[in-house]
Each structure stands twice: as C-alpha cells, then as structure tokens.
Image: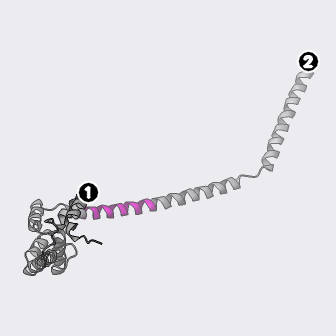
Amino acid sequence: MVDIVEADASHEEAQQAREENLEEETLEEIPPEPEKTEEKSKDLQSALAQKDHYRTKLEKAEADKKALEEKLKGFSSQATGDPMEAVRLGKALAEHSEEEADIIITYAKGKFNNLKPTPEQIIQASKDEWVKAAISAQREKVRSENKTPAPSSPSPIIGGKTAEDISKMSTAEFSKMAREQMKGWRSGV
C-alpha cells in the first residue's frame, strides 16, 4: 500500500507541474494588454474633451443668459411709467382722431429728435401752434370736401310725386300713375 500512496503523490506532483507549465505557456502566449490600455486612454481622452467642450458651452450659455436678463431689466423699468402721465396723454389726444394723433406723434419724433417720444413730449407736441394749425386746416379741408352742394335745379315732379316717391312705388302703383299721366297724350292714329 505504501507504493500506491507514493504513486498518487507523484501523480499529483506531475499534475501540478503540468498546470504550472500550462499557466506559464498561456501567460507567455498572451501578450500584456497594451491595446486595451491604449483604447482606454483614447476613450478617456475623448470623454475629457467632451467634458471640456460642454463646460465651455455651459459657460457661454450662462453668460448669454445674464446678458439677456440685464436687457430684460432695462425693458421692464421702461414699461412701468407714471399712470397719471398716461391719463394726461389720453386727455391731450382725446379730441383728435387716429390720423391726427399720428401727425402729432410724428411731429414729436422730429421736434425732439427721438424715435420713441415720451408721453410728455407728445403732450407738448399736441399743444404746439404749428400742429394745431395743421390739424385745423386738415379738418376744414375734410369739411369742404364732404359738403354737398345744393341742387342747381329743383328735382322734377311728375304727377305731384318726386323721383324718390316714384322709386318707392310698386310696379302696379307706378303703372296706374303712368296711365293717368299719359291719358291726354294719346293720338288718334
């Protein structure tokens, strides 16, 4: 029995030796993983470049946002004006038509050299003598154009009826009136 144990022990030693040789051979055949490290470094470089790109993009977007917020603050402060100023402007332009108000605003733009005149400037322009004269001349021109002249000759009357009365008549009424009017005009032919 002793011989069997030695044989088993030598067999185990031989297997261990074979496994060690196999491991050494497989390790020698498989080169170290330089490709994987290169791929990892390329992926890492790509990820870092993307990170920098998006960080730059974010900083630019935040700067644009701040600039737009500053512009917005400027608009909101201009929009909130004195409500009494708006009331005064409304009273100053109340007696004028839209065309006349446009004339006043255009005059205010030129007089104050401003593309967006303030309500106070528009009120001042509406009180200007030149503007008042121009508006009254325009009103007078419209009045004279719209004035209908009196008829030069009176409208014809047929059988005691005017042209308006005749146009309002029905066909039967008109034919009856026309027969009565034409009775004396017949010839004996």
Q: Residue at x 12, y 69 (%)?
A: 96
Q: Position of residue 154 (x, y in %)?
A: 12, 74
Query: Measured along the vertical axis of the image, is residue 147 above or below residue 37?
Result: below
Q: Residue at x 78, y 47 (%)?
A: 27
The type of residue carrying mark 1 is Ala
Q: Nearer the viewer, residue 84 or 80?
A: 84
* One can see residue 76 in this view: no
Q: Is residue 40 above or below residue 112?
A: above
Viewer-nearest residue: 113 or 62: 113
Callout 1 secondary element: helix
- The residue wearing badge 1 is 172
Residues packed near mark 2 inside 10 Å, few (<14), some (14 to 19) or many (20 plus): few
Q: Is residue 176 visible?
A: yes
Q: Is 33 situated left or right of 112 in this image?
A: right
**Residue at the far top in the pictured view:** 1
Circle nearer the N terminus (2, 1): 2
Q: Quadrant of residue 159?
A: bottom left
Magenta part of the protein: which range? 57-74
Question: With respect to residue 32, does 76 lie above or below?
Answer: below
Question: Closest to the observer: 68 or 25?
Answer: 68
What distance separates the C-alpha of mark 2 from that of mark 1? Answer: 152 Å
- Is residue 85 shown above or below 22? below
Q: Which quarter of the figure has residue 38?
A: bottom right
Q: Is residue 68 magenta?
A: yes
Q: Residue at x 17, y 68 (%)?
A: 158
Q: Position of residue 70 (x, y in %)?
A: 28, 63
Residue that mark 2 sits on: 1
Disc 2 versus disc 1: nearer the observer? 1
* Amino acid type, label 2: Met
x, y percent for residue 179: 23, 63
